[in-house]
Amino acid sequence: MDEKISLIPLGGVSNVTKNMYLYEYKDEVLIVDCGIGFADETMLGVDLLLPDISYLLKSKKKIVGLVLTHGHEDHIGALPFILPQLPQFPIFGTPLTAALANEKLKEFEVGSRVNPVEFGKGQLSLGSFSLSFIRVTHSVPDTSHIFIRTPVGNFYHGSDFKFDLTPADNKKIEFDKIVAVGKEGVLCLMSDCLRSEKEGYTPSELTLAENFEREIAKAKGKVIITTYSSNISRLNQAIKAAQKFGRKICFVGRSFYKVRDVAVDLGYMKIDKGSEISVEQLKNYKDSQVVLIVAGSQGQENSALSRIANGDSKEIKINSNDVVIFSSDPIPGNEISVNNVIDSISQKGARVVYSEISSDFHVSGHAAANDLMLLMSLLNPKKVLPIGGTYRQMVAYKELAKKQGFEDGDILLTDDGQEIVFTKSASSFGKKLTLKKVYVDQMSGEEVEHFVLIDRQKIAENGVVIVMAEIDSETGKMVNSPTIIARGFSSQESATLNKTLVNELRNKFSIKTERVNDWIYIRRLIGEIAEKNIFKAFRKRPLVLPVVVEV
Amino acid sequence: MDEKISLIPLGGVSNVTKNMYLYEYKDEVLIVDCGIGFADETMLGVDLLLPDISYLLKSKKKIVGLVLTHGHEDHIGALPFILPQLPQFPIFGTPLTAALANEKLKEFEVGSRVNPVEFGKGQLSLGSFSLSFIRVTHSVPDTSHIFIRTPVGNFYHGSDFKFDLTPADNKKIEFDKIVAVGKEGVLCLMSDCLRSEKEGYTPSELTLAENFEREIAKAKGKVIITTYSSNISRLNQAIKAAQKFGRKICFVGRSFYKVRDVAVDLGYMKIDKGSEISVEQLKNYKDSQVVLIVAGSQGQENSALSRIANGDSKEIKINSNDVVIFSSDPIPGNEISVNNVIDSISQKGARVVYSEISSDFHVSGHAAANDLMLLMSLLNPKKVLPIGGTYRQMVAYKELAKKQGFEDGDILLTDDGQEIVFTKSASSFGKKLTLKKVYVDQMSGEEVEHFVLIDRQKIAENGVVIVMAEIDSETGKMVNSPTIIARGFSSQESATLNKTLVNELRNKFSIKTERVNDWIYIRRLIGEIAEKNIFKAFRKRPLVLPVVVEV
């Protein structure tokens, strides 16, 4: 009988996030990535998802190791939740990836366990698997593709990437390695497909630096730049531009601090001595002397940028000669939140630059159609399997593969939990795992501060609380007492909950005196205050449903 | 003292929908448009908004007339709710606009009252106002701009438009009239600004016809086209292409039937005899013999397309050689719903064509930057005032106006409820009305079937019901009994409600046996079933909050 190897995606196929892939050979399992997913609007009260690892827990097979492709949340974020449930095994990632993953583990008081592996340090052996890390480019430095040699055949794990020929950090894509492993032979290429719908090539980050400089040069007031905290090369470009014009840099939002510390430590970020100031020091400088790098580019509830836009920040007010640059695109589903933040800032008279009016400040970190076809051409694999995209993007990838001469049977469209069994020459669909959604309830705030795993039993145990509040749209103040409806609390608890929550909310909403523009922000703020209060009083995390009535 | 005229927007400024504008001169009021708004995600349980007409109700001033610019919901949809509250006055619109508005009035059992006025029929006198209708192009035929002569000065009410030089219905824009009224003198141009952020000119509809033909020619199975029901010229192009290839046309979704009837009656839509079939007749034809025009291009809950995509339609199943064309773009906020529908269809193997992968099947109905500047150039007004866009789009319009040489003081950015007082030579901000949000609770379904006005007192009276259901993701079936939490019902009512709702939901969710892709659809379906049931049993419309737990 032919030797076999299985690929089982636990997450990342037919959806973009929650990446986790198992390569199974005999009694050995190699894991690639371990990321979180982001909840959508149907999942009221929960924010994050984890891959379901029931199969790994039940399986008697031996995990020979875990490797990480890059340092983004949807590839490393589930480590603190999942590692404590599994036996010991070695974990590897490129230096920055390892550092970011270890930082995350420390945050949750799980020990650092990820070993840094340099590009070009030869092969890494984990059981029967032999791995090479290949440098590619993406929106975080040290992103790699992983070439996986197995006794059955070789796999090219080509997750999130773009082909940036002029990367901001000047660390070039290892095309030579890609071509070499292609010559060695690739049984299956697992490929990023998120931008398979977009024609042509994804542009380089390079031009953004000039564009930042141009904006900073002509700005009369503060320059506020918002982007993902993980986008280190983007942050570097903003820092460089600020320093060129002698402006002080101020990071606003906790999500930036950790990334900055890790990146500065390892030399991935350079900030001249004395050129960074804290939020508290802002008052000592004129608006024209600072560049603020602010968290909240997706319009997240209670992010630094939302607070500033809604007039809730003590230290930072928007003035009419400020310019606010969104160096990011809204993720589908976030459009309304982002639009509300843009509108709130626009109404304060500041100039806002965002992707609809200028493509100068954001380019994608993912490969477009031509890049994807180029990777196929360089590798010449027997089979291709799109990962990291929705089903429609997998279908678009299939069209590209057909143009490259692949037969229908060699283009594998699959789904989370579906095993694909490879022999040296063929592939077939194997067992289908039933994966359940595993929710993580993220305590509010822009930063991951406190997590608690919940599942349906826990929802039942923790109850449900509806908070119905009337808010005056002219002043932002709460009118009358909010109505609290609780289920899953004793009558005494309910009475306590009602009293404390009503007081707390009335207090918090008695100070504000600003016309309400962003109702999503208000609704989330109420939800967050309620969650914090209930947790403090009862150590419970019920499903909180805030309902706002505008009066 | 100088004579004065006031403009008061009751809706449509700093938001896109709910258009209603008052022009006040002495004791006379002219109303332009009377549209509904669409609720956003913060407004749980309500779907539509109306302009707040408290000012009109309190004012002793005389309404001399109401004129409509075009037949879209956000310009005519509030008529059935608002007219019964006001005294009699004449109402005018161009022929199709009048017919669509009268159809809407009939539906709500308010008598037909809108008088058709042909383009080029000279001036219409309403009190001291003298009006001319000017033909422009938009995504519904007979769209007009309205030139309003007043004793103080002339206003150009330039709401929703584009400059399509090759319109599908061959009815050309009346540029001669635009230039003529420009020469006569325009005190203020009120201008559409929705696409002010987009560079260049908005393309013509013309190329779409060829693209439909190409798709139909090569399709082996059914061709399914989805678009807005109001987009009559798009429907005409689809019909023409279907007829060219001898395919039968089948409209699916009630929202199309009324529009088709009105448009066919007035000669705005031509369907060859015998070429239209009903949904019931579909079974008599092969897939390759039909083109389906299906409602639900925005992924709306329970729309025909969502039902088909989720396998809930008896008559229409998606096959792998079908092609589904989205001839529309998602409206911000609908991205996730639309993406879910696309994914569900893709997984059934059909080819799906949508804006990200092809711009061949949708162009906007709104003017882009150059079109907007062209209108300014043709009219040469003293002042400009952007309408029909969000604040950021108003800001983008301001930048265009500056490029056209307007001074800051002559670019009027305003807000709903803010009076602007014009004299012959100047303008100033007047009183600010406090407008409350007026909600309309639209009974579920893709079609507006039944409305009830609710306000916060009514929410309190009608109560709140939470429905928490566990759904098996593999089969779509309900697991266990749903939990019902009601507030605002007597204990006896609660018991009845609990019993009937649990039974109804368990029944409805016992038949389905299909893997769940679209959780938003499931959640909304549960909400809808609950709403219908509760209304039937208690004649109450509580706020229903469905919570779905995936198991």
Image (tube, coloured by chain):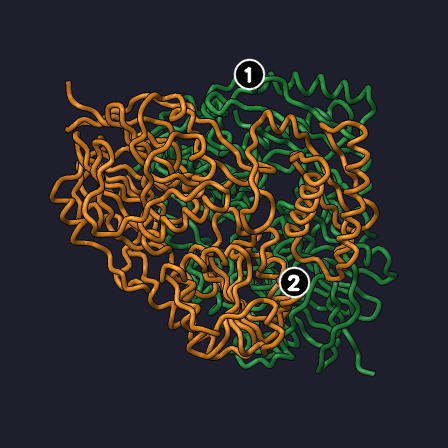
Chain colours: A green, B orange
Which residue is found at the position 53% from the left and 49% from the top?
B334
Protein chain holding label 2: B
Q: Are marks 2 and 1 on the same chain?
A: no
- In the rendering, at what x and y percent does residue B44 appear? 60, 37
Q: Nearer the viewer, residue A479 or B46?
A: B46
Out of B94 and A408, give the one closest to the viewer: B94
Find the residue positioned furthest to the front: B111
Residue type, numbered disc 2:
Ser
Q: Residues within 10 Å of mark 1 (few under 14, many from 20)?
A: few
* SS class, disc 2: loop
A275 w.r.t. B121: above or below: above
Q: Is residue B101 above or below residue A480?
A: below
Q: Secondary structure at mark 1?
A: loop
Residue A502 x %, y %: 66, 19
Q: Which residue is mark 2?
A: B313
Q: Quadrant of residue A483?
A: top right
Q: Amino acid at mark 1?
A: Ser
Q: Quadrant of residue B534?
A: top right
Q: Residues within 10 Å of mark 2 (few under 14, many from 20)?
A: some
Residue furthest left in the image: B183
Residue at figure coordinates x 31%, y 43% from the top left:
B92
Q: CA distance from mark 2 to mark 1?
A: 51 Å
Tag in front: 2 or 1: 2
Residue A53 visible, this angle: yes
Left or right side of A551 for B210: left
Residue identified by numbered label 1: A510
